[in-house]
Image (cartoon, rainbow, N blue to C red):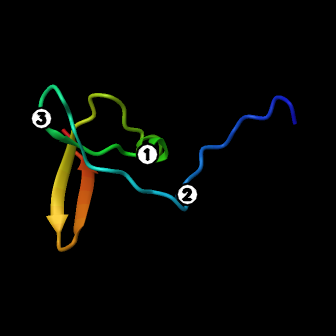
Amino acid sequence: MENEIPLMQKNPGKNFSTVEVDPVTGEYVVQVPEWIISEFGWYEGTQLNLEVDGDSILITELKD
């Protein structure tokens, strides 16, 4: 179909990201897949909380 809207792939088989270092700040950076950002309604400037739980990292949005 010519005018079909592409669907965002949720939970694709390849959900991997590489730890990188920002060349300007020297901070570590991990890219979050777009489908995750959209799923939670996050946008640039959304404040997130990162917690370590055993071998996992939990990411939650900070609420006012």
Q: Earlier in the sequence, mark 3 or mark 2?
A: 2
Label 1 near label 3: C-beta < 8 Å? no
Q: Amino acid at mark 3?
A: Gly
Residue 12's disc number = 2
Residue closest to the eye, 22 or 32 = 22
Q: Amino acid at mark 2?
A: Pro
Q: Mark 1 falls on what kind of element? A: loop
Q: Residue at x 18, y 38 (%)?
A: 64
Rendered position, 13 above or below 33: below
Circle nearer the N terminus (1, 2): 2
Would you identify the image quadrant in which residue 33 lies?
top left
| Pointers 1 and 2 in contact (C-beta within 8 Å) | yes
Among numbered discs 3 and 1, the one appearing first in the sequence: 3
Instruction: Give the residue at x 13% y 38%.
Output: 27
Q: Is residue 43 left or right of residue 63?
A: right
- In this rendering, would 6 be left or right of 26? right
Residue drawn at 18 percent across, 48 percent down = 49
Label 3, secondary structure: give it.
Answer: loop
Instruction: Choose top left, top right, bottom left or bottom right for residue 31.
Output: top left
Identify the residue at the far left of this view. Answer: 26
The residue identified by callout 3 is 26
What is the crowding at mark 3: few (fewer than 14 residues within 10 Å), some, or many (at least 20)?
few
Q: Say which residue appears at 60% left-offset and 44% top-offset.
A: 8
